[in-house]
Image (cartoon, rainbow, N blue to C red):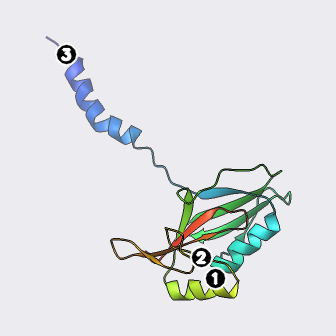
Amino acid sequence: MKKPAIPFLFFLMTIIAPNLMAQQTKITHIAVYVKELKRSTDFYKNIFEFPEIEEPFKDGLHTWLNIGNNLSLHLIEAPWEPVTINKINHICFSVTDMDLIISNLKKQKVEFEDWPGNKNKINIRPDGIKQIYVQDPDGYWIEINDEY
């Protein structure tokens, strides 16, 4: 008499299915809609010293910057339409030296603030991580912290 195939198939699926469904996914870039490409490119290059990398579109409306950890920042210029911006929706960059980044912000005349909005103040999270917030030329919020 043949043994039922269903228990065997069930056994195989418990071994094989998780491997088939364990699709690897990773973030490769963050796209940011900007009003003036050069102004935004200069901001991210000057403040964070992100190197510019090969730009595949070659249409003068895109800049790609290497932001580390195999990630890119993709700046895209398009006809500007107002966007809703608030601090809760932000990009975060971690740095090794908060004093150095603050010094560079001051040199570049870029204002920073803590989470509540106090100018030139550093926020300290409950876990001891220091953080500040700046806005890019289009008003997007950027958290900078020392959780590197």
Three-letter code, disc 1:
Leu
Which element carries disc 3, helix, strand or loop? loop
Q: Identify the residue at the far left of this view.
A: 1
The residue lying at 59 percent from left, 57 percent from top is 86
Q: Mark 2 points at which residue?
A: 112
| First along the sequence among labels 2 and 1 | 1
Quarter of the image where the N terminus is located: top left
Query: Position of 47 compared to 98: left or right?
Result: right
Is the Cβ of the residue at disc 2 closer than 8 Å to that at disc 3? no
The numbered disc on residue 105 is 1
Toward which corner of the image does residue 49 lie, by quadrant?
bottom right
Which element carries disc 1, helix, strand or loop? helix
The residue lying at 48 percent from left, 82 percent from top is 96
Toward which corner of the image does residue 52 lie, by quadrant?
bottom right
Is the Cβ of the residue at disc 2 closer than 8 Å to that at disc 1? yes
Toward which corner of the image does residue 47 lie, by quadrant?
bottom right
Q: Name the residue under label 3.
A: 4
| First along the sequence among labels 3 and 1 | 3
Q: Identify the residue at the far top of this view.
A: 1
Name the mark nearer the viewer: 3 or 1: 1
